[in-house]
Every structure is written in structure tokens, then in C-alpha cells.
Image (cartoon, helix red, strand yellow):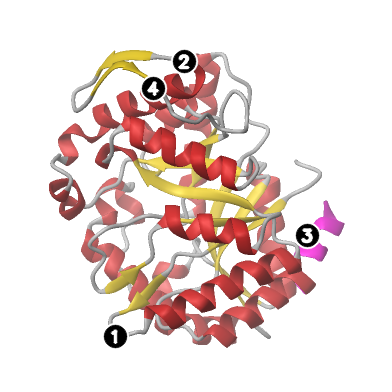
Amino acid sequence: MPRKIEFGLMIRGQFPQGDDMRVRFKEVLEQARLAEKLGFTSVVKGSHYSSWPFQYLQQFPFLARVAAEAPSLRLVLGLVLLPLHKPLDIAEQVATLDIISDGKVVFGTGIGYREVEFKAFGTTQKDAARRFEECLIAIKRLWSEEFVDMMGSHFELKGANCTVKPVQKPMPPIWIGANADPAIRRAARMSDAWYVNPHNKIETIARQLDVYKRALDECGKPFPAEFPMMREVFVARGRAQAIQLARPSLEVKYKAYHEWGQDKVMPKADHLDLDFDELMNDRFLFGSPAEVTDQILDLVRRFGITNLVTGIHWPGMSQQLVVDQMHMLAEEVFPAVRRAL
């Protein structure tokens, strides 16, 4: 069991249609500044395109602004959907962000699952795994070699160089987000850590941890020094109140995930087409500060996680409710977890 744990804040930047995004943007910047003040160690920003029924802030410009607003925070790209992109572009974008943040970037990446995104970027889900792997290989080479020659299925590097190199040497930490067993084995083979998703049930993750460990053994790699996990979290006076307050916005979010096809890349037993009461069981961390403390400690003891990314803000939730959550977590839950460790 790790003797210390870091806590990150997931800022998805997802908001309902009709919201004034200038106002919402100012609110999430306030969250980032407050996260730094309260002792969170990182801000995580994901990426989706054509994200109806939500409006969605994109990760690279957003995290660049966070670097200026909260300079001590690590910036986690969680996740860059590599099959949609070209490696030279992503290599230079991530390196630039690492320079802007003085070496605080974590390069989180994944395959994606939405057909609307694949088609919009001229590819298919069938080609996603191949494109992902060759793109990641190319990015690593661009960061570590002066000039690169490499032919991919959707790019050609001929004497190409990455205009700027990352501050972190040889490169920023690479986390691969994965839902299914093959993707978890890929994470063991190609990255510094499997970034455990918030969707799969705890019992599924327990089984998948064995998949991950066996894959690490086959690659001759030790268990990572950093083992990150994301969970949806809500703290209130008790579990019933937490569920009551979180349900309206979290239910909308997971309904959209199901409609987007998230279930298709998850183990069959973990599908999202469920009543909320069933959906939240064995997935979300809900309850009083003491209850959520115990739930986090259980994750740390069972899985050895070192970085817990907390998702506490969902479409339609008020800024005040988010701010209250951040204070309760930072002032009551995190200190209790650290004392217990």
C-alpha cells in the first residue's frame, strides 16, 4: 500500500446547450485556482468532439490557461484520442504545454469509441488500435530523436523533427486510459501507467488488475510508481443526501455516455443502461466525509493507487455545489485519508 496519495480534480468542461460558455469558463478557472489553494495536485481535462447534448471546452487551450492561473498544478491530458490525430501535431502540442507549465504535463491518451468522432477525422473504429499504437510510437520517437523517418498508415515522417522538446526527460509520463482487457495489456506494454477509468465496477477492476500485472510481467516491467484511478465522487452529510444532490446531473451525463456508445468498449457486465440506483453501486464514491474517506482507503488498499482523480462536477450542477464539494474533500476527506496512510 502506498504511503502517500495525490488528489486530482477532473474538469470536464461539459455544460448543457444554452449555457453561456464565457460564464462557465470563468467558473472552471475559479475551480482550478481553488484546487491549487486547497492542495489538489493536478487538474485533468479530457477531450471529445461533437459532444451533443453538451458544450465542451477543448483540452489544450484550456490547460495552457490553467498553467497561468494555477502554476503549481500538474496538467493531465486525460485523454488525448490518438487515433484521431497525427503524431507530429500532438508531439509538438504536448511539448509546448510542458514548456508552458515548466514540466508539469502528464500525457494521458486513449483510443476513443465514438463513431461520430472517427468519421469526422477520416477514420474508423476498426483502424483505431493500429493508428493508436503507431501514433504513440512516433510521438515517443519525435521526443527522443532529433530526426525521425517512419511510415504509418495515416502519416509519413521523413526527416521530421519535433520543433520543441518536452521539459521532462526523456518525456512526460504517459498514462493510457483503458476499459477492456486488450487495451489494459496495451497500457502495460506501451505506457508508464494504466489510468483506471471511472466507468467499470470495482469488482471488474479487481479482475483487470490481475490482467495488468500479468501483462507487466510479460513485458519485464515493474508495477508503476504512479498508479492513477478516476472515480465520480460526491460528499454530503450522508449517503442519501449525496445521492439526492448528485443524481440530477450525473444521471444526465451517464445517459449521454450510454447513447454515445461508451458501453461498447466496456466489459459486458458493466453496461451503463441501468437505473441510477443500480448504476452507482460499485462505481461511485458517495457519502459523508467519513464514508468517502473509507471508500478511498479501500481503493488504495485493494489496488495500490497513488493518484485519485476526483470527478465532482457534471452538466447542470451549480458552481456553488462544486466549490462546496472541493472544500469538503480538501478539508475533511483528504487529511483523513493521509492520516490513515
Looking at the rendered image, the quarter that the N terminus falls into is top right
Which of pointers 3 and 1 lies earlier in the amino acid sequence? 1
Which one is in front in this view, the residue at disc 1 or the one at disc 2? 2
- Amino acid type of disc 3? Val
Residue beneath the point at 55% across and 30% down: 192
Task: Answer with mark 4 or mark 3, whichever residue precedes in sequence.
Answer: 4
Q: Residue at x 38, y 65 (%)?
A: 57
Which residue position holds label 4? 137
Q: Residue furthest right?
A: 339
Magenta segment range?
A: 332-341
Identified by mark 4, the residue type is Ile
Query: Of label 1 and label 4, which has the lower sequence position?
Result: 1
Quote the CA–CA distance across marks 1 and 2. Answer: 47 Å
Q: Nearer the viewer, mark 3 or mark 2?
A: 2
Question: What residue did someone put label 2 on?
Answer: 146
Task: Give the foreground label among 4 and 3.
Answer: 4
- State the residue in front, 276 or 30: 30
Quadrant housing residue 309:
bottom right
Residue 9: x and y in percent read 59, 62
Dot label at residue 337: 3
- The kind of residue on which mark 1 rests is Gly
Where 331 falls versus 106 (above or below)?
below
Indicate the position of residue 227 as horizontal and vertical percent values: 61, 40
Give the residue displayed 15% in from the left and 39% down from the top.
123
